[in-house]
Image (tube, helix red, strand yellow):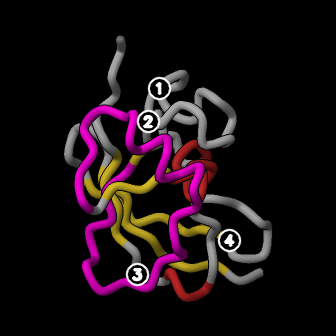
Amino acid sequence: MSDIKITIIDREGHAHVVEAPTDMNMNLMEVIRLHELAPEGTIGICGGMAMCASCQCYIQNKGHLMPEKSYEEEDMLDQAFFVEENSRLSCQIHIEKEMEGLEVKIAPFNED
């Protein structure tokens, strides 16, 4: 088993250092759900298909190497609320060893 440590800041502003497995083909949204860092029904509503932006997060480490955004991710972020320059869909970020030390903040949930 190969775990990395990631810091996830929840919607209330509390930081949680969590372990994320690199050998289970998980994405960041699944790690957030695994550790119950967002209320059920407020993250990953579309099941990780890049179709709802409920899993939007902000990458806090400016220089951290991240995978490129896909067309689908860019398109969904263009329609989302609370988008910042560092916004990503956590369902589109697969956990890899290179993400050790990553820090993300979960975006606010839009109930409309």
- Which mark sits nearer the N-terminus, 3 or 1? 1
Q: Amino acid at mark 2?
A: Ala
Q: Upstream in the sequence, badge 2 or badge 4?
A: 4
Q: Amino acid at mark 1?
A: Thr
* Residue that appears at 29% across and 86% down: 63
**Alpha-carbon span between mark 1 and mark 2:** 7 Å
Chain part drawn in magenta:
57-85
Of all residues shown, which one is farthest toward the top? 112
- Position of residue 89 relative to residue 49, above or below, is below
Q: Which residue is mark 3?
A: 101
Mark 3 surroundings: few (<14), some (14-19) or many (≥20) residues within 10 A: some
Q: CA distance from mark 4 to mark 1?
A: 23 Å
Q: Residue at x 31, y 42 (%)?
A: 107
Amino acid at dot 3: Gly
Indicate the amino acid at tag 4: Pro
* Cβ atoms under marks 4 and 3 closer than 8 Å: no
Q: Quadrant of residue 105?
A: bottom left
Q: CA distance from mark 3 to mark 1?
A: 25 Å
Q: Name the side, left or right, on which 94 lies relative to 89.
A: right
First of labels 4, 3 by sequence position? 4
Residue drawn at (33%, 65%) of the image: 59
Is the C-beta separation of discs 1 and 2 under 8 Å? Answer: yes
Q: Position of residue 112 (x, y in %)?
A: 35, 11
Q: Which residue is mark 1?
A: 42
Disc on res. 26? none
Residue indicated by mark 4: 21
* Circles 3, 1 touching at the beta carbon (< 8 Å): no
